[in-house]
Structure formats: C-alpha cells, structure tokens
Image (spheres, rainbow, N blue to C red):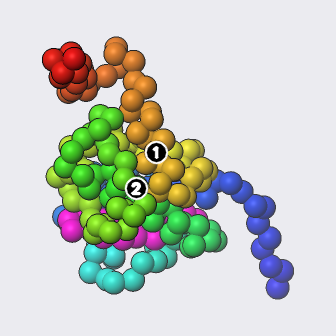
C-alpha cells in the first residue's frame, strides 16, 4: 500500500474557539471553509463541547480533525487543526493563547486600554486563570492576542510574553478616532491627573 505524502504547509490552524461552561460560543475564528455556515459551526462547537467537557485529556480526534483543548474555571479553549497536524504545534498555540490571556487579564489595575504587562517572575508567581467575566470585559485584548498568534491559519508567535508586549503596544498606538469611549475617558483622566500633579 502506498503511503500518502503530504506537502508541508504553513496553514496549520483551522480554528480557535472559546466556549463557556454551557457550550455557548464566546469567541470563534475559523481559518478555512471546513464549516462554511454559522449553523454548521455552532453544531460542530456543540459536538466538540459535548465530547470534551467531561474529560481530563487534552487532545481529541473529532470529525477528522485534531482538537487540543484546555479548561479554566468557566471557559473551554480549543485549537483545531487537520487530522495529520502536529499536536505539539497546536498545543503550543493553545498554551500561548491561554498564557497570554492569563497575563493580560490577571491584574485589576489597567494599563494600555485594559492590558497590563507583567514581568516573567510575576507571571509564574501568580496562578494562571481566565474567567468568563474578565474575558468579556476585555474582548479587544482577546482579538488582538489571537491576531498576534495566528494569521490566516499560519502560526506567527508562540511566546506569550511577546504576544502580551505586542498587544500592549498596539493598544497604546490607537488613533483617537478609533478608540472606544472608555479608552478616550481613560486617556482624558490620565491627562487631567498629570496636569494637576505639575
């Protein structure tokens, strides 16, 4: 029997999902047309959640796809690749996403539009947890982090420290016309504070 030889490809990630503890979508980004309609995507997400939310393993093969996943408090994180994809690469993406979000959302104090960069010593000293409420309050950080890690299915970065640093830089350089109201108010508060301290 002749072995199937596949061409190497940079397009390793088919989707990144974050579901809540009921299996409902909080974030989903699909990088190909495996599931072209929202109805098919939601059915796939329900199937993944039903197969994985009660298990302790980290890797599953579902519907011909490799799924790596992790849970934290009330969230489930998934990175999906093809059945022949290297699980370690998919797990590196998952860990980078989880650790980046953990570092960005950990602090109660805000900097750069809700993001706070921590030193590596602080990052390892504190517990790594991401919860639904904090994630929903900082969705812009999630979008930026995912865009820094994966672009069009191609893995760009797997170091959470670099992702946090780049997201913080992108958060600082937003033009006034593209800032949210809360960002504009925060900036105004900072300017008033510094003018009073002079």
* Residue at the outermost right position: 2
Quarter of the figure with residue 186:
top left
Is residue 72 a member of the stretch shown in magenta? yes
Is residue 58 a member of the stretch shown in magenta? no
Q: Residue 53: which numbered mark, if any?
A: none
- Where does label 1 land, which residue? 165
Residue 94 percent across, percent down from the top left: 45, 63
Q: Secondary structure at mark 2?
A: loop
Locate the N terminus by quadrant.
bottom right
- Where does label 2 land, which residue? 119
Q: Nearer the viewer, residue 121 or 158?
A: 121
Q: Main secondary structure of the magenta part?
A: strand
Q: Which stretch appears magenta?
A: 68-82
User: Mark 2 or 1 closer to N-term?
Assistant: 2
Look at 61% across and 58% down and name the residue there: 12
Q: Is residue 142 left or right of residue 134?
A: right
Q: How many badges with numbers are in the image?
A: 2
């Amino acid at each position: 029997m002749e072995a199937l030889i596949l061409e190497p490809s940079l397009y390793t990630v088919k989707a990144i999902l974050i579901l809540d503890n009921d299996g409902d979508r909080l974030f989903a980004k699909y990088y190909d047309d495996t599931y072209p309609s929202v109805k098919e995507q939601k059915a796939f997400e329900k199937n993944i959640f039903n197969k994985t939310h009660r298990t302790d393993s980290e890797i599953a093969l579902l519907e011909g796809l490799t799924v790596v996943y992790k849970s934290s408090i009330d969230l489930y994180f998934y990175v999906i690749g093809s059945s022949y994809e290297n699980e370690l690469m998919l797990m590196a993406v998952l860990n980078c996403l989880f650790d980046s979000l953990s570092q960005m959302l950990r602090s109660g104090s805000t900097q750069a539009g809700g993001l706070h960069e921590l030193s590596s010593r602080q990052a390892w000293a504190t517990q790594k947890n991401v919860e639904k409420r904090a994630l929903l309050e900082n969705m812009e950080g999630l979008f930026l982090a995912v865009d820094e890690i994966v672009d069009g299915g191609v893995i760009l970065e797997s170091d959470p420290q670099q992702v946090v640093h780049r997201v913080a830089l992108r958060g600082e350089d937003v033009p006034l016309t593209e800032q949210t109201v809360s960002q504009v108010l925060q900036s105004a508060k900072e300017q008033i504070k510094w003018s009073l301290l002079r």
